[in-house]
Image: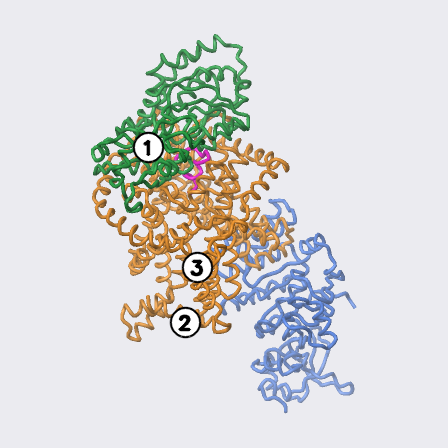
Chain colours: A blue, B orange, C green
Amino acid sequence: MAQPAISCRNVWKVFGPDPAAHVAALSAGGSGAAGHVVAVRDVTLDVTRGEMLVVMGLSGSGKSTLVRCLSRLIETTAGAIDIDGVEIGSLTEASLIALRREKMGMVFQSFGLLPHRTVLQNVAFPLEMRGMDRMARTARAREVLELVGLRSREDYFPRELSGGQQQRVGIARSLAIEPDIWFLDEPFSALDPLIRREMQDEFLRLKKQMDRTIVFITHDFDEALRLADRIAIMKDGAIVQCDSPDRIVLAPASDYVAKFTAGVDRSRVVHVGTFAMPLPPDAPPEGSPLPAGATLREIARSLVADPRPTIPVADTSGRLVGALDRNAALDLVLEARPA
Amino acid sequence: MTDSAATDTAVVRSTTEKGPRVWQGLLIAAVLLAVGQALLPPGLIRPPDWAILPFADWINAAFYYAQNELGLMQVTRAFAGGVEWSLDVTGNLLYGRNRWPRIGPIPWSTVAVTAGMLGYALGGWRLAALAGGTFVWIAVMGQWRWSMETFSVIVVAAPVSVFIGLCMGTLAWRSKTAERIINPILNIAQSLPHFAYMIPVVVFIGLGPKAGAVVTIIFSVPPMIRMTLLGLRKVPEEVVEAGKMSGATRWQLLTRVRLPTARTEILIGVNQVIMQCLAMVVLASFIGMPGLGQRLLQLLQALRIGPSVEIGITIVLLAVTLDRLSRAWAMRQPAHPEPGESWASRNRLWLIWAGLVAAAFGLAQLVPYFHEDERSQALSIAPPIDAGVNWFIGFVSPVTDWIRRVLVVWVLIPFRDAILWLPYTTVLAAVAALGWAVGGWRSALVCVGFILPIALSGWWDRAMITVYTVLAAVTLAGIIGFPLGIWGAGTGRRAAVVRLVCETMQTFPRFIYMIPVVMLFGVSDVAVLAAVMVFATVPIVRYTIEGLDSVPPETVEAAEMSGATRRQVLGNVRLPLAMPTILVGFNQSIMFALFMVIIAAFIGTQDLGQEMQRALSATDVGKGLVLGLAVAFLGLMADHLLMRWAERLRQAQRL
Amino acid sequence: MQRHAKLLIGAAAVALTAAQGHAQDSSDPIIIPTHNWSSQIVMSHVVGNIFEDMGMSVEFISADSQAVYEAIRLGDVTLGLEVWEGAFGASFSAALEKGGILDVATHDAITREDWWYPMWTKEACPGLPDWEALNACAEIFATPETGDRGRFLGGPVDWLKNDQQRVDALGMNFTVVNAGSAAALWAELAAAERDSTPIVLFNWTPNFAEAVWPGEFVEFPAWEEGCDKDPALGPNPDATYDCGNPADGYLKIAAWDGMPEKWPTAFAVLERINFSNPQIAEMAKLVDIDGLDPEDAALAWLEANEDTWRPWVE
């Protein structure tokens, strides 16, 4: 199997007077000393290359701390994190800086723009750190600004822009070096709902144009469902479930996860391909297949009209991949849960 | 007033309920020691001779060692040499001192035009008029050379201060240990009377403009350190993280991310440095700072009030101008240029400035008056000022004679005698009691820790006279300032007027007040009190206004809806809520009074200030520092008590 | 006016440099301290102008009048032009003992510092200037601070005048109140003048105050050498300081002991410099009464007194 882009093994982050001892005590099944806060609890996780992982959790669940461990903005207390097979905890400061300059980009909740620099200078900042000459970095920064539609504002200062525009600058800055790994820490949380929706669309557009590994943090479950290849749900520092959106909606691992999914219109999330049963080996269903990549909601109309009890499902290449139980699918569309 | 006092005692009571009522016990002990002093051994009334520690000798020995054995003298003199070289350059440019680069002096008209342009760029027409007008006033009044002598020192001292402050502030931010060392030094330095560190400067640097510059640097560094530290702390974590993720090294992070982001705080630090430099203009002339301060002292020495007031006005104008300019700079936010603007229109202000400077320069070549103004061509408003002061003194002197007699005979002498009558053990116990009441055993220990060294230094009686003067002055300042503040807090317009008056009184050189005060009250404690009060009243008025104005309007509205009269709203709602802020005002008032009491030695006092004056003229470093520290400790103790109390009130309000 | 005077001195300087073309004087500035009384400032500028036009570089710095002797010793300051016996005799002697400072010359001017009163006081206390008469009308000098006793307004304590010892030694019904600065003394005097309040205070000559407020020194038992150390001298056999201050104190010129080597010509001139009481009083008057600035006053004085200073430089 291909090497994952990011791989965490038993990662802990504990704040307090003696974090290491606390981790040891907790790992051994004890309760540890008082006065410690466990922000990340024994997280083991792989992110494959080109995958978009959304880490979802309420505030205080440790998701922001986790992403800062992945980028080594903070040191982990225990465990190991590999980026492209390199253990980042053991990197020297110089190699860490080189890694960031070459491979990583990050977008922040409150944008983290430099107030004294223009939009253009902000976007060019990582390139400047790399030592790129002025002409080259200005050209590249303009290119990225074009991508996020802010070319006309390049001489503005951050405080002269709206929140949405500021975040576009943040995004442009993080993309300036064409990172392999892109961290986004609640990028849209500080924006109002209408802008947020618009930015999500924009984000999906950008994502389609590129092929990179993305770790996206959010506290908004709908946003996670909308954007993710895979969702990791965190509670009290631990990952309670890490699965595709369909799986999370169909099979919540705990009551906690179920609470999030309760209000969700599952038919908009669940894909035909996921919901389908394996093909019966003896008698494959007949007739025109449904597309595996569509959500149940999208095929709801044809489902109602289709008289077949089991309907074949095919992927984009036309190969049959499964069979859909029409009644079960209808139940889900109509939100009548089977007992 | 009575209500707020009631809440105060309620708070004090609630704090002591936890522990035994130790502070009451201490207070009773203090009273017993005072009343029964006839029975006490003399060692409990005044510190016995064997307990007096020769701090001054120790300090002098240490300084002697540093100066002669460690060769610190070479270091300081080398530093002073660098400062002196810079002073030569600015001296040449600004007032034509015969030193390299031998270009100057710059015509005054170009400086005035530049100041006006700077004002316009930073704050529009009003600031332009203020800045340009100030320099025109200086030239027209024939004070150009003096002002430039002063300026030549400030333009060297302020940048050095800013640089040192940035470095030390960064160091304190970077290392907890450094902060732990720097912080108490700053606390003491900021409460040490100016004269105390002028003596070591004379020893290590010598006299003259360089000594003036060095003492100005020392005096103006602390606020810069504090503001740098504050600014670096306030940089949003995400901005730093963004910098790190951009691959910045530590140095790049500091110079390109943190320091630029802390720009506003750092510039406010610069503003404070400039203000501190101006505050030193007169005092530093005691050790050779040339210019306005030196002239002012000479004029006062010959009792020429009118011309000294002219200089005073110049100093106030300069202070206000530089304050407004630097604050406008600090508050200024960058803005984008309009798209499609031409080069000329982008650089419009620069071009206008260059044009104006060229014009002024040309004019200066044609008309010498615009190049260098001679004293003989100066205007003067001294005669009307003298007449005004004379008239005023003649007008009020019948009243002031009476005030002097009543205050001296019935209030001040009994009060002073009473304080001197107290055994030092009483004072120690009372201070411990106060500390305990306000902040438990820790505060009691802190307070005793501050006051015991004073008893052991051998300057007890003089320190008590200082305490007496400060207490009397702050009490009187409270009696005047507190109602004034309440009056001023009524409306925005009144507050603005009161604030303006306060600001002017504060920046006006203190030495000028001493002459009319002596003419009114003679060389007496009343004159000292009057001079001290001028300063001590200002913070009380200011903070009373601020405290009352910052009471949340909903709270006041709620009280009004409950049917409270205006008086009830004031007494039951606004004053109690404003109390913590007002206490901060009293705290500052005590600080100001302590500084001024030392300077009032030039009127004639018998306290620590008089000895400080003696130490200065004898260049006695040890004695000067011991006296200075005694003053600083008194200030720090008052600061501890009042801030603790204010904190307590704030906590109680939060509940 | 400034330019005019410069020319004048310039002419003299040309003559001088022609005569002493081989002078080895250093080009470093000669540093002359100015203190906070006007005659001294004017005198410093007079001497400074003379040096400057001899081709020396001169600089003025303001310095504390007591601390300056330490500065002269270290060479931070080159010379001192007004060393008053009464006020600075002690600091000067101490510096002489430590070494590094030279006693260059003594002015003709004599100095006197003592108890003094303005003329209107004499009307209220006609027996003056005798000290016993003063003591007899002590109560007219009473103030709220001093109760029934008369008040003597002394100078700042750091002028070290031993007034309290004298009051005790002579059994006077006076209390000494020390003003903190000369300015405070003059302010009190000016205030007393308004309604002719009797006042007795510390004063000295030569001084501008003589011209503003005519007055006299109180006559104490005459100073005898040792009166401050030997109780037997003076009217009170058991006490020191039972006498007035010397009525003819010296006024000296001091210089850094490196000066003769570094600026030999200038030092030679300095040795010849000599001012008298009227000359010093005139310098003070130019500033304090006529309202000139010290620099202008110095030029005016040079212009008017060429006969006096020309011989020094030739």
Q: How many marks?
A: 3
Q: Is residue A208 left or right of residue B334?
A: right
Q: Amino acid at mark 1?
A: Trp
Q: Amino acid at mark 3?
A: Gln
Whether the residues at callouts 2 and 1 have beta carbons within 8 Å, the answer is no
Indicate yes or no whether the magenta region holds residue C271.
no
Q: Is residue B378 left or right of residue B24?
A: left
Q: What residue would you read off at disc 1?
A: C115
Q: Amino acid at mark 2?
A: Ala
Q: In the displayed structure, would residue B240 be above or below residue A292?
A: above
Give x and y (percent) for residue C211. 28, 27
Q: In the displayed structure, would residue C54 be above or below residue A165?
A: above
Dot 3 falls on which chain? B
Q: Is residue A6 visible?
A: yes
Q: What residue would you read off at disc 3?
A: B37
Front tag of 3 and 1? 3
Dot 1 falls on which chain? C
Q: Residues within 10 Å of mark 3 (few under 14, many from 20)?
A: some
The answer as to whether the residues below labels 2 and 1 share one chain is: no
Q: What residue would you read off at disc 2?
A: B10
Q: Point out the image quarter for the N terminus of chain B.
A: bottom left
Nearer the observer, B332 or B138? B138
- Residue situated furthest bottom in the rendering: A339
